[in-house]
Amino acid sequence: EKNSKEERISNGWFDGFKPCKYAGTIYDKSGISLFHVIRFNSIHILSILHFGLLILLEYDTIGLLTIVENMHYIMMHISGLCMGIALLCNSKKFITYCILINTELMQQEIKLPKMQEVYRKNNIFFKSFMKMSTSMFIWGFIATFFRRPLFDRKTHMTVPHEGWVPFEINTWPRYFAVCTFQFAVGLNLASGHLATVLSYVIHAKHLCGQFEILSILIQDTFKDDLNAENNKIEENKPQREMFIKSRMSYIVQRHHLLLKCFDLFQSLYSAFLFTLSLTSGIMFCTLIYMITDPKSSSFLITEFVTLLFSEMTVIGCYCWFGQEMSDWWDHIREVVYNIPWYKESIKTQKTLLNIITGSTKDKTIMAGGLQEFTVKGFSEMVQASFSYFNMLKAVR
Protein backbone atom coordinates (compact mmCIF):
# COMPACT_ATOMS: atom_id res chain seq x y z
CA GLU A 1 0.00 0.00 0.00
CA LYS A 2 2.84 2.37 0.84
CA ASN A 3 4.59 1.67 -2.47
CA SER A 4 1.39 2.25 -4.45
CA LYS A 5 0.84 5.53 -2.61
CA GLU A 6 4.37 6.69 -3.41
CA GLU A 7 3.83 5.65 -7.03
CA ARG A 8 0.67 7.78 -7.23
CA ILE A 9 2.50 10.75 -5.71
CA SER A 10 5.43 10.44 -8.09
CA ASN A 11 3.16 9.98 -11.10
CA GLY A 12 2.42 13.63 -11.78
CA TRP A 13 4.18 15.42 -8.94
CA PHE A 14 7.72 14.09 -9.30
CA ASP A 15 7.71 14.76 -13.04
CA GLY A 16 6.56 18.39 -12.73
CA PHE A 17 3.25 17.83 -14.54
CA LYS A 18 0.66 18.45 -11.82
CA PRO A 19 2.25 21.61 -10.32
CA CYS A 20 2.23 23.27 -13.75
CA LYS A 21 -1.21 21.96 -14.68
CA TYR A 22 -2.84 23.38 -11.55
CA ALA A 23 -0.85 26.62 -11.79
CA GLY A 24 -2.10 27.18 -15.35
CA THR A 25 1.19 27.09 -17.25
CA ILE A 26 0.49 24.02 -19.41
CA TYR A 27 -2.56 22.80 -21.32
CA ASP A 28 -3.35 19.10 -21.69
CA LYS A 29 -6.72 19.54 -23.49
CA SER A 30 -8.71 18.91 -20.31
CA GLY A 31 -11.38 21.24 -18.95
CA ILE A 32 -9.61 21.81 -15.63
CA SER A 33 -6.33 22.79 -17.31
CA LEU A 34 -8.23 25.22 -19.60
CA PHE A 35 -9.82 26.82 -16.52
CA HIS A 36 -6.45 27.23 -14.80
CA VAL A 37 -4.83 28.65 -17.97
CA ILE A 38 -7.57 31.29 -18.30
CA ARG A 39 -7.43 32.06 -14.57
CA PHE A 40 -3.63 32.32 -14.51
CA ASN A 41 -3.33 34.65 -17.50
CA SER A 42 -6.39 36.78 -16.68
CA ILE A 43 -5.23 37.54 -13.14
CA HIS A 44 -1.73 38.41 -14.37
CA ILE A 45 -3.13 40.86 -16.94
CA LEU A 46 -5.41 42.45 -14.33
CA SER A 47 -2.43 42.66 -11.95
CA ILE A 48 -0.30 44.52 -14.49
CA LEU A 49 -3.17 46.97 -15.08
CA HIS A 50 -3.76 47.29 -11.32
CA PHE A 51 -0.18 48.41 -10.59
CA GLY A 52 0.55 50.09 -13.93
CA LEU A 53 -2.49 52.37 -14.07
CA LEU A 54 -1.61 53.80 -10.65
CA ILE A 55 1.72 55.00 -12.08
CA LEU A 56 0.14 56.33 -15.29
CA LEU A 57 -2.88 58.08 -13.75
CA GLU A 58 -1.47 59.24 -10.41
CA TYR A 59 2.18 59.81 -11.27
CA ASP A 60 2.24 63.34 -9.78
CA THR A 61 0.60 62.41 -6.48
CA ILE A 62 2.53 59.27 -5.50
CA GLY A 63 6.15 59.26 -4.40
CA LEU A 64 9.15 57.84 -6.26
CA LEU A 65 9.36 55.00 -3.74
CA THR A 66 5.82 53.88 -4.56
CA ILE A 67 6.57 54.11 -8.28
CA VAL A 68 9.65 51.89 -7.95
CA GLU A 69 7.75 49.45 -5.72
CA ASN A 70 4.96 49.17 -8.29
CA MET A 71 7.50 48.83 -11.10
CA HIS A 72 8.88 45.81 -9.27
CA TYR A 73 5.45 44.22 -8.95
CA ILE A 74 4.73 44.96 -12.62
CA MET A 75 7.98 43.26 -13.68
CA MET A 76 7.21 40.26 -11.47
CA HIS A 77 3.82 39.84 -13.11
CA ILE A 78 5.18 40.42 -16.62
CA SER A 79 7.86 37.83 -15.88
CA GLY A 80 5.31 35.35 -14.51
CA LEU A 81 2.93 35.94 -17.42
CA CYS A 82 5.56 35.63 -20.17
CA MET A 83 7.25 32.61 -18.57
CA GLY A 84 3.86 30.95 -18.21
CA ILE A 85 2.98 31.66 -21.85
CA ALA A 86 6.39 30.32 -22.95
CA LEU A 87 5.67 27.02 -21.20
CA LEU A 88 2.05 27.04 -22.38
CA CYS A 89 3.16 27.30 -26.01
CA ASN A 90 5.42 24.30 -25.39
CA SER A 91 2.76 22.20 -23.63
CA LYS A 92 3.19 19.36 -26.12
CA LYS A 93 6.95 19.21 -25.49
CA PHE A 94 6.36 19.48 -21.74
CA ILE A 95 3.96 16.53 -21.74
CA THR A 96 6.33 14.54 -23.99
CA TYR A 97 9.17 15.14 -21.53
CA CYS A 98 6.99 14.01 -18.60
CA ILE A 99 6.07 10.85 -20.52
CA LEU A 100 9.76 10.17 -21.19
CA ILE A 101 10.48 10.51 -17.47
CA ASN A 102 7.77 8.03 -16.49
CA THR A 103 8.53 5.52 -19.25
CA GLU A 104 11.93 5.58 -20.92
CA LEU A 105 14.00 7.19 -18.16
CA MET A 106 12.50 5.41 -15.16
CA GLN A 107 12.46 1.94 -16.75
CA GLN A 108 15.91 0.37 -16.75
CA GLU A 109 16.62 -3.08 -18.20
CA ILE A 110 19.71 -3.32 -15.99
CA LYS A 111 19.24 -2.61 -12.29
CA LEU A 112 22.38 -2.30 -10.18
CA PRO A 113 22.38 -1.38 -6.46
CA LYS A 114 24.20 1.89 -7.16
CA MET A 115 21.63 2.79 -9.81
CA GLN A 116 18.77 2.14 -7.38
CA GLU A 117 20.54 4.35 -4.86
CA VAL A 118 20.49 7.23 -7.37
CA TYR A 119 16.71 6.86 -7.74
CA ARG A 120 16.28 6.78 -3.97
CA LYS A 121 18.37 9.92 -3.43
CA ASN A 122 16.49 11.74 -6.20
CA ASN A 123 13.12 10.93 -4.63
CA ILE A 124 14.34 12.22 -1.27
CA PHE A 125 15.62 15.36 -2.98
CA PHE A 126 12.29 15.96 -4.77
CA LYS A 127 10.34 15.75 -1.50
CA SER A 128 12.76 18.05 0.34
CA PHE A 129 12.98 20.57 -2.50
CA MET A 130 9.20 20.77 -2.88
CA LYS A 131 8.77 21.38 0.87
CA MET A 132 11.54 24.01 1.08
CA SER A 133 10.41 25.83 -2.08
CA THR A 134 6.79 25.90 -0.95
CA SER A 135 7.82 27.23 2.48
CA MET A 136 9.96 29.96 0.90
CA PHE A 137 7.17 31.13 -1.42
CA ILE A 138 4.61 31.09 1.40
CA TRP A 139 6.92 33.19 3.58
CA GLY A 140 7.54 35.65 0.73
CA PHE A 141 3.80 35.90 0.07
CA ILE A 142 3.02 36.54 3.76
CA ALA A 143 5.76 39.18 4.10
CA THR A 144 4.51 41.00 0.99
CA PHE A 145 0.79 40.78 1.68
CA PHE A 146 0.65 41.64 5.39
CA ARG A 147 3.40 44.27 5.71
CA ARG A 148 1.28 47.38 4.99
CA PRO A 149 -1.94 46.37 6.83
CA LEU A 150 -0.03 45.32 9.97
CA PHE A 151 3.02 47.60 10.19
CA ASP A 152 2.63 50.54 7.77
CA ARG A 153 -0.99 51.50 8.31
CA LYS A 154 -1.88 55.00 7.12
CA THR A 155 -5.63 54.63 7.60
CA HIS A 156 -7.92 52.01 9.12
CA MET A 157 -8.50 50.77 5.54
CA THR A 158 -4.90 50.26 4.44
CA VAL A 159 -4.82 47.69 1.63
CA PRO A 160 -1.85 45.30 1.16
CA HIS A 161 -0.60 47.08 -2.00
CA GLU A 162 -1.01 50.50 -3.56
CA GLY A 163 -2.75 49.90 -6.86
CA TRP A 164 -5.37 51.56 -9.04
CA VAL A 165 -9.03 50.70 -8.51
CA PRO A 166 -11.99 52.39 -10.26
CA PHE A 167 -13.57 53.49 -6.97
CA GLU A 168 -12.64 55.04 -3.66
CA ILE A 169 -12.02 52.60 -0.82
CA ASN A 170 -14.31 54.18 1.76
CA THR A 171 -16.49 51.26 2.87
CA TRP A 172 -15.68 47.90 4.40
CA PRO A 173 -17.20 45.86 1.53
CA ARG A 174 -14.99 47.73 -0.95
CA TYR A 175 -11.98 47.29 1.31
CA PHE A 176 -12.50 43.54 1.61
CA ALA A 177 -13.13 43.28 -2.15
CA VAL A 178 -9.77 44.95 -2.91
CA CYS A 179 -7.98 42.81 -0.29
CA THR A 180 -9.51 39.65 -1.77
CA PHE A 181 -8.42 40.67 -5.27
CA GLN A 182 -4.87 41.44 -4.12
CA PHE A 183 -4.76 38.14 -2.22
CA ALA A 184 -5.71 36.32 -5.46
CA VAL A 185 -3.07 38.36 -7.31
CA GLY A 186 -0.31 37.38 -4.87
CA LEU A 187 -1.38 33.75 -4.72
CA ASN A 188 -1.51 33.52 -8.52
CA LEU A 189 1.98 34.99 -8.83
CA ALA A 190 3.52 32.82 -6.10
CA SER A 191 1.91 29.57 -7.30
CA GLY A 192 2.96 30.22 -10.90
CA HIS A 193 6.61 30.87 -10.05
CA LEU A 194 6.63 27.94 -7.62
CA ALA A 195 5.24 25.55 -10.24
CA THR A 196 7.72 26.61 -12.92
CA VAL A 197 10.80 26.39 -10.69
CA LEU A 198 9.63 22.97 -9.45
CA SER A 199 9.14 21.65 -12.99
CA TYR A 200 12.52 22.99 -14.15
CA VAL A 201 14.46 21.58 -11.20
CA ILE A 202 12.62 18.23 -11.27
CA HIS A 203 13.21 17.83 -15.01
CA ALA A 204 16.87 18.82 -14.69
CA LYS A 205 17.45 16.54 -11.69
CA HIS A 206 15.87 13.57 -13.48
CA LEU A 207 18.27 14.07 -16.38
CA CYS A 208 21.27 14.53 -14.07
CA GLY A 209 20.31 11.27 -12.36
CA GLN A 210 20.23 9.48 -15.71
CA PHE A 211 23.67 10.85 -16.61
CA GLU A 212 24.97 9.53 -13.29
CA ILE A 213 23.31 6.14 -13.86
CA LEU A 214 24.87 5.89 -17.32
CA SER A 215 28.28 6.66 -15.82
CA ILE A 216 27.75 3.92 -13.21
CA LEU A 217 26.73 1.48 -15.93
CA ILE A 218 29.84 2.22 -18.00
CA GLN A 219 32.12 1.80 -14.98
CA ASP A 220 30.41 -1.45 -13.98
CA THR A 221 30.77 -2.85 -17.50
CA PHE A 222 34.55 -2.49 -17.45
CA LYS A 223 35.20 -2.95 -13.73
CA ASP A 224 36.76 -6.42 -14.29
CA ASP A 225 39.36 -4.82 -16.54
CA LEU A 226 40.24 -2.46 -13.72
CA ASN A 227 40.37 -5.01 -10.90
CA ALA A 228 41.23 -8.38 -12.41
CA GLU A 229 44.61 -9.73 -13.39
CA ASN A 230 45.51 -9.98 -17.08
CA ASN A 231 45.65 -13.81 -17.14
CA LYS A 232 42.18 -14.02 -15.58
CA ILE A 233 40.81 -11.69 -18.25
CA GLU A 234 42.32 -13.87 -20.98
CA GLU A 235 40.68 -16.99 -19.51
CA ASN A 236 37.24 -15.38 -19.56
CA LYS A 237 37.74 -13.46 -22.79
CA PRO A 238 34.89 -15.05 -24.84
CA GLN A 239 32.39 -14.51 -22.06
CA ARG A 240 33.72 -10.97 -21.48
CA GLU A 241 33.32 -10.07 -25.14
CA MET A 242 29.72 -11.29 -25.19
CA PHE A 243 28.99 -9.42 -21.97
CA ILE A 244 30.58 -6.19 -23.19
CA LYS A 245 28.84 -6.41 -26.56
CA SER A 246 25.45 -6.72 -24.85
CA ARG A 247 26.19 -3.93 -22.39
CA MET A 248 27.61 -1.58 -25.05
CA SER A 249 24.50 -1.95 -27.17
CA TYR A 250 22.39 -0.89 -24.19
CA ILE A 251 24.79 1.94 -23.22
CA VAL A 252 24.73 3.43 -26.73
CA GLN A 253 20.93 3.21 -26.77
CA ARG A 254 20.70 5.05 -23.42
CA HIS A 255 23.27 7.62 -24.50
CA HIS A 256 21.25 8.47 -27.62
CA LEU A 257 18.08 8.69 -25.51
CA LEU A 258 19.72 11.08 -23.04
CA LEU A 259 21.04 13.21 -25.89
CA LYS A 260 17.48 13.41 -27.22
CA CYS A 261 16.16 14.33 -23.74
CA PHE A 262 18.80 17.03 -23.28
CA ASP A 263 17.88 18.62 -26.62
CA LEU A 264 14.18 18.42 -25.73
CA PHE A 265 14.88 20.07 -22.36
CA GLN A 266 16.80 22.87 -24.09
CA SER A 267 14.02 23.39 -26.62
CA LEU A 268 11.33 23.33 -23.91
CA TYR A 269 12.92 25.90 -21.60
CA SER A 270 14.80 28.16 -24.04
CA ALA A 271 12.10 30.85 -24.46
CA PHE A 272 11.08 30.43 -20.80
CA LEU A 273 14.63 31.18 -19.58
CA PHE A 274 15.04 34.00 -22.10
CA THR A 275 12.05 35.79 -20.55
CA LEU A 276 13.48 35.20 -17.09
CA SER A 277 16.89 36.59 -18.07
CA LEU A 278 15.30 39.76 -19.51
CA THR A 279 13.24 40.54 -16.41
CA SER A 280 15.46 39.32 -13.57
CA GLY A 281 17.94 42.21 -13.85
CA ILE A 282 15.19 44.84 -13.54
CA MET A 283 13.56 42.97 -10.64
CA PHE A 284 16.86 42.79 -8.72
CA CYS A 285 17.53 46.46 -9.52
CA THR A 286 14.22 47.71 -8.10
CA LEU A 287 14.61 45.54 -5.00
CA ILE A 288 18.09 46.89 -4.26
CA TYR A 289 16.80 50.44 -4.81
CA MET A 290 13.98 49.95 -2.29
CA ILE A 291 16.35 48.42 0.27
CA THR A 292 18.96 51.19 -0.02
CA ASP A 293 16.58 54.17 -0.21
CA PRO A 294 16.90 56.36 2.94
CA LYS A 295 13.12 56.89 3.00
CA SER A 296 12.38 53.17 3.26
CA SER A 297 10.97 52.06 6.60
CA SER A 298 12.46 49.13 8.48
CA PHE A 299 9.39 47.01 7.70
CA LEU A 300 9.62 47.87 4.00
CA ILE A 301 13.31 46.94 3.99
CA THR A 302 12.50 43.64 5.73
CA GLU A 303 9.86 42.83 3.11
CA PHE A 304 12.12 43.56 0.17
CA VAL A 305 15.14 41.79 1.69
CA THR A 306 12.86 38.74 1.95
CA LEU A 307 11.82 39.17 -1.69
CA LEU A 308 15.44 39.69 -2.80
CA PHE A 309 16.52 36.51 -1.01
CA SER A 310 13.62 34.54 -2.51
CA GLU A 311 14.10 35.82 -6.05
CA MET A 312 17.88 35.36 -6.03
CA THR A 313 17.40 31.84 -4.65
CA VAL A 314 14.97 31.02 -7.47
CA ILE A 315 17.28 32.43 -10.18
CA GLY A 316 20.17 30.63 -8.49
CA CYS A 317 18.25 27.33 -8.72
CA TYR A 318 17.75 27.77 -12.47
CA CYS A 319 21.46 28.48 -12.96
CA TRP A 320 22.73 25.86 -10.48
CA PHE A 321 20.84 22.97 -12.03
CA GLY A 322 21.69 24.18 -15.52
CA GLN A 323 25.34 23.99 -14.46
CA GLU A 324 24.81 20.55 -12.90
CA MET A 325 23.36 19.20 -16.16
CA SER A 326 26.38 20.43 -18.11
CA ASP A 327 28.79 18.99 -15.53
CA TRP A 328 27.17 15.54 -15.53
CA TRP A 329 27.15 15.47 -19.34
CA ASP A 330 30.89 16.20 -19.33
CA HIS A 331 31.35 13.55 -16.64
CA ILE A 332 30.24 10.82 -19.07
CA ARG A 333 33.13 11.67 -21.36
CA GLU A 334 35.59 11.56 -18.46
CA VAL A 335 34.29 8.16 -17.30
CA VAL A 336 34.68 6.66 -20.78
CA TYR A 337 38.18 8.05 -21.15
CA ASN A 338 39.32 6.75 -17.73
CA ILE A 339 38.32 3.11 -18.32
CA PRO A 340 40.99 0.78 -19.84
CA TRP A 341 39.57 1.09 -23.36
CA TYR A 342 42.96 0.21 -24.86
CA LYS A 343 42.49 -3.40 -23.66
CA GLU A 344 39.25 -3.85 -25.57
CA SER A 345 38.56 -4.98 -29.11
CA ILE A 346 38.71 -2.52 -32.00
CA LYS A 347 34.92 -2.56 -32.34
CA THR A 348 34.44 -1.70 -28.66
CA GLN A 349 37.05 1.05 -28.91
CA LYS A 350 35.18 2.58 -31.85
CA THR A 351 31.92 2.48 -29.93
CA LEU A 352 33.53 4.16 -26.92
CA LEU A 353 35.06 6.76 -29.23
CA ASN A 354 31.62 7.54 -30.63
CA ILE A 355 30.30 8.08 -27.09
CA ILE A 356 33.22 10.40 -26.30
CA THR A 357 32.63 12.30 -29.55
CA GLY A 358 28.92 12.65 -28.79
CA SER A 359 29.68 13.85 -25.26
CA THR A 360 32.24 16.37 -26.52
CA LYS A 361 29.49 18.53 -28.03
CA ASP A 362 28.85 21.61 -25.91
CA LYS A 363 25.75 21.07 -23.77
CA THR A 364 25.10 24.33 -21.97
CA ILE A 365 21.57 25.42 -21.04
CA MET A 366 20.97 28.65 -22.95
CA ALA A 367 18.19 31.24 -22.80
CA GLY A 368 17.24 31.90 -26.40
CA GLY A 369 20.81 31.10 -27.43
CA LEU A 370 22.06 34.30 -25.74
CA GLN A 371 22.35 33.87 -21.97
CA GLU A 372 23.96 30.91 -20.21
CA PHE A 373 22.04 29.49 -17.27
CA THR A 374 25.08 28.32 -15.35
CA VAL A 375 26.99 29.66 -12.34
CA LYS A 376 28.78 32.01 -14.71
CA GLY A 377 25.45 33.13 -16.16
CA PHE A 378 24.12 33.87 -12.66
CA SER A 379 27.04 36.21 -11.94
CA GLU A 380 26.43 37.97 -15.28
CA MET A 381 22.76 38.56 -14.42
CA VAL A 382 23.64 39.92 -10.98
CA GLN A 383 26.20 42.28 -12.55
CA ALA A 384 23.59 43.47 -15.05
CA SER A 385 21.15 44.22 -12.22
CA PHE A 386 23.71 46.47 -10.52
CA SER A 387 24.17 48.34 -13.82
CA TYR A 388 20.41 48.97 -13.90
CA PHE A 389 20.55 50.00 -10.24
CA ASN A 390 23.21 52.64 -10.92
CA MET A 391 21.02 54.08 -13.69
CA LEU A 392 17.97 54.16 -11.42
CA LYS A 393 19.97 55.61 -8.52
CA ALA A 394 20.82 58.62 -10.70
CA VAL A 395 17.10 59.49 -10.73
CA ARG A 396 16.92 59.51 -6.89
Image (cartoon, rainbow, N blue to C red):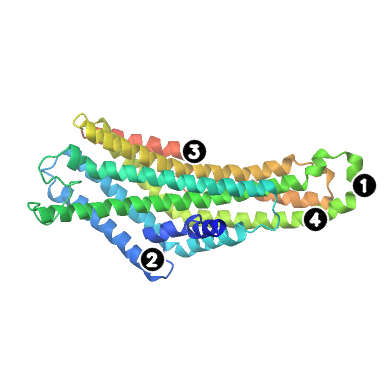
Question: Between marks 1 and 3, how big is the CA–CA gap?
Answer: 49 Å
Number of the front mark, 1 or 4: 1
Query: Does the residue at mark 1 contact the one at mark 2 (Cβ under 8 Å)?
Result: no
- Between residue 216 and residue 254, name the one nearer to us: 216
Please state the horizontal and vertical placement of residue 290, each as a whole percent of the image.
25, 35
In this figure, which residue is indicated by the disc labeled 2?
33
In this figure, which residue is indicated by the disc labeled 4?
245
Q: What number is the disc on residue 375?
A: 3
Please state the horizontal and vertical placement of residue 72, each as a whole percent of the image.
27, 44
Residue 278 vertical placement versus 173 (above, below):
above
Query: Does the residue at mark 2 contact the one at mark 4 (Cβ under 8 Å)?
Result: no
Q: Residue at x 89, y 53 (%)?
A: 238
Relative to residue 312, is residue 180 drawn left or right? Answer: left
What is the secondary structure assignment of the residue under circle 2? helix
Q: What number is the disc on residue 112?
A: none
Number of the front mark, 1 or 3: 1
Question: Of callouts 1 and 3, which one flags the residue occurring earlier in the amino acid sequence?
Answer: 1
- Between residue 241 and residue 349, name the one nearer to us: 241
Question: Between marks 2 and 4, how big is the CA–CA gap?
Answer: 47 Å
In this figure, which residue is indicated by the disc labeled 1?
235
Crowd band around label 3 with a 10 angstrom C-alpha radius: few (<14), some (14–19), many (20+): some
Farthest residue toward the top? 294
